[in-house]
Image: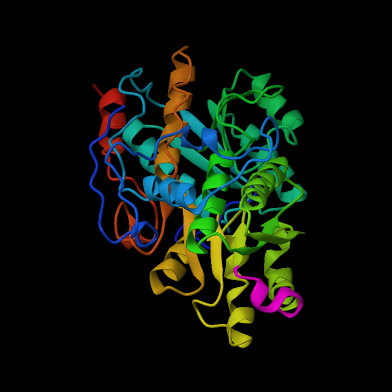
């Protein structure tokens, strides 16, 4: 069993009502704007952001970007997930197939699932695909041999692994995913009854909006993505649309870099980009924090000051990203996923399926972490863990 404390980087595969709130006065991008308490970081706020189709000559203004960023940086709003559900069915055994346990996002979900399993009286067995096709095949084979009652697919594309998932479905094993597809909810054409994730396109648009806000509408942007994953390309396109809709921003390049090869390639790519674009390159938007883990040394070696370029990530909120943001070392933003909460949610969705009930379909609100709010909602532990009582709420549902 791998060491779950070695959370480095972030996940592979994803690149692919009225609320009471307290607004802190230190939000650096909102110095000139009054923000009212009715703004909340709720799902759907991105529906008015530029999209690829159906919008003629869309524009993004600095004021608009600042308002959107302000909503998403508020401290956690109250719980908006399920308030009721079936009692936990004791004694269940769950197989957790992870794309790569070197990845901080997946490790965070695994830790949450382990907490939930303990609360439910379940057994959780974790199988590591180690980021390779051979490793993934072995993980699925070992998981099937364990004869689980339920399966969690974590960080791997469900359509790409459809044949393996059908083997579980043929044994009436319900399947829930995390970042296993492009949208929250069931994944058509696969046995995945619920894909747990925040809305990835809203995450991407928010990240790009943060670059517009930071730069006062003059960002020179490089986007990093991974063409292996359709969701990564969709996120990159969503970020590109926002930057192109900002009249004085410049999209310098969209660079395709496999997440699995980021450790090998990003140092040289960073050096190359510096040579090619120089001071025109002011902001990097990435579909995942992990790219930045391997960019910092090249920036430092090139004598780029820590505030000389801004790194912004559209997921997941890794421990290393939190450290960089806290230290104000290049990275300024991550749109962090509530990884531990997602671990509890995947277990709750399986419990609903065991009880013959529909999944909850809950989609957590998106949240932007920056230097002003990093100390809240789990930030002191280098993670985004909403302080909304979700653990007790789930426990009460499972053990009434």
Quadrant hosting residue 282: bottom right
Quick one: 392 or 117, which is closer to the camera? 392
**Percent x, y of residue 70:** 38, 50
* Residue positioned 43% across, 68% down in the render: 323
Q: Is residue 87 visible?
A: yes
State the predominant SS element of the stretch in magenta.
helix
Question: Residue 245 appears at what percent x and percent y?
Answer: 64, 48
Residue 310 locus on image (x, y percent): 54, 68
Residue shown at the point (54%, 59%) measured from the top left = 211
Residue 240 horizontal side relative to residue 378, left or right: right
Apparent side of residue 69 relative to residue 246 in the rendered image (left or right) = left
Image height of 163 relative to 87, above or below: below
Q: What's the magenta region? A: 273-282
Q: From the viewer's perspective, tell me whether residue 256 is left or right of residue 292.
A: right
- Can residue 111 be seen by looking at this rendering? no
Q: Which of the two residues, 49 or 4, is positioned nearer the viewer here? A: 49
Please tell me whether residue 323 is drawn above or below residue 44 in the rendered image: below
Q: Is residue 351 left or right of residue 230?
A: left
Q: Quadrant of the C terminus?
A: top left
Residue 348: percent from left, percent from top: 42, 28
């Amino acid at each position: 069993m791998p060491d779950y404390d070695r959370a480095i980087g972030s996940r592979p595969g994803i690149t692919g009502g009225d609320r009471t709130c307290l607004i802190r006065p230190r939000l650096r991008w909102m110095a000139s704007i009054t923000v009212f308490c009715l703004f909340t970081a709720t799902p759907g706020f991105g529906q008015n952001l530029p999209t690829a189709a159906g919008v003629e000559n869309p524009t993004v203004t600095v004021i608009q970007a600042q308002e959107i960023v302000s909503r998403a940086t508020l401290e956690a709003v109250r719980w908006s997930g399920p308030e009721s559900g079936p009692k936990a069915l004791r004694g269940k055994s769950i197989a957790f197939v992870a794309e790569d346990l070197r990845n901080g996002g997946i490790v965070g979900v695994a830790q949450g699932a382990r907490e939930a399993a303990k609360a439910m009286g379940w057994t959780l067995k974790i199988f590591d695909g180690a980021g390779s096709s051979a490793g993934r095949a072995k993980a699925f084979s070992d998981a099937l041999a364990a004869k689980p009652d339920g399966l969690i697919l974590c960080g791997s594309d469900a359509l790409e692994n459809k044949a393996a998932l059908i083997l579980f479905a043929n044994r009436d094993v319900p399947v829930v995913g995390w970042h296993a597809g492009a949208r929250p909810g069931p994944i058509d054409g696969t046995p995945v009854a619920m894909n747990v994730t925040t809305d990835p396109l809203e995450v991407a648009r928010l990240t790009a909006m943060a670059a517009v806000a930071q730069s006062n509408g003059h960002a020179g942007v490089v986007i990093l993505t991974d063409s292996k994953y359709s969701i990564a390309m969709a996120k990159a396109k969503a970020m590109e649309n926002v930057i192109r809709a900002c009249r004085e921003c410049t999209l310098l390049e969209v660079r395709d870099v496999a997440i699995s090869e980021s450790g090998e390639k990003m140092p040289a790519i960073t050096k190359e980009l510096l040579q090619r674009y120089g001071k025109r390159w002011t902001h990097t938007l990435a579909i995942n924090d992990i790219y930045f883990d391997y960019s910092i040394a090249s920036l430092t070696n090139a004598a780029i000051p820590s505030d000389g370029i801004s790194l912004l990530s559209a997921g997941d909120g890794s421990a290393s990203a939190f450290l960089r943001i806290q230290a104000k070392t290049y990275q300024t933003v991550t749109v962090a996923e509530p990884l531990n909460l997602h671990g509890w949610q995947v277990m709750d969705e399986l419990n609903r399926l065991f009880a013959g009930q529909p999944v909850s379909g809950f989609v957590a609100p998106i949240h932007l972490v920056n230097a002003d709010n990093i100390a809240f909602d789990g930030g002191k532990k280098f993670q985004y863990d909403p302080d909304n009582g979700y653990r007790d709420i789930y426990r009460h549902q499972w053990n009434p």
